Image (cartoon, rainbow, N blue to C red):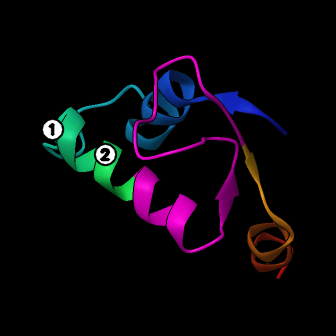
């Protein structure tokens, strides 16, 4: 499954106001997932809204539990 960074932020929040998170906080979390090997797709430090992100095998195996 591939999603854009914008879609991932929307899915993360579920379109609901369940918590107050800034775009910066969500972007930092996405960057941490990229650096730790849970997501792939972005090159360099900057993640654009249209960047396509994919789960790695590490994330897929965790989700299959």
Query: In terms of depth relative to the viewer, which is nearer, 46 or 49?
Result: 46
Q: Position of residue 59 (x, y in %)?
A: 74, 69
Q: Is residue 47 magenta?
A: yes
Q: Residues within 10 Å of mark 1 (few under 14, many from 20)?
A: few
- Magenta span covers which residues? 30-53
As drawn, the label of residue 50 is none
Helix, strand or loop at label 1? It is loop
The disc placed on residue 22 is: 1
Q: Is residue 55 left or right of residue 10?
A: right
Is-magenta flag for residue 44? yes
Quadrant where the image shows the C terminus: bottom right
Dots 1 and 2: beta carbons under 8 Å? yes
Residue 56 x, y percent position in the rendering:
80, 63
Picture quarter containing residue 18? top left
- Mark 2 lies on a secondary structure that is helix
Examine the image and state in which quarter residue 9 appears: top left
Residue 19 vertical position relative to residue 8 in the rendered view, above or below: below
Say above or below: 63 vs 53: below
Front-most of 45 and 24? 45
Q: Residue at x 85, y 39 (%)?
A: 1
Q: Are there few (<14), some (14-19), or many (20+) residues within 10 Å of tag 2?
A: some
Residue in view at x 66 percent, y 57 percent: 39
**What number of labels is visible?**
2
On the image, the x and y values in percent for residue 12 come to: 45, 42
Residue 14, quarter of the rendered image: top left
Q: Position of residue 60 (x, y in %)?
A: 83, 67
Q: Nearer the viewer, residue 11 or 45?
A: 45
Q: Which residue is mark 2?
A: 26
Q: Residue at x 45, y 34 (%)?
A: 47
């Amino acid at each position: 499954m591939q999603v854009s960074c914008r879609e991932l932020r929307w899915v993360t929040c579920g379109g609901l106001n369940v918590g107050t998170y800034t775009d910066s906080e969500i972007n930092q979390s996405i960057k941490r997932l990229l650096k730790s090997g849970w997501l792939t797709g972005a090159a360099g430090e900057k993640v654009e809204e249209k960047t396509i992100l994919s789960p790695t095998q590490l994330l897929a195996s965790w989700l299959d539990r």
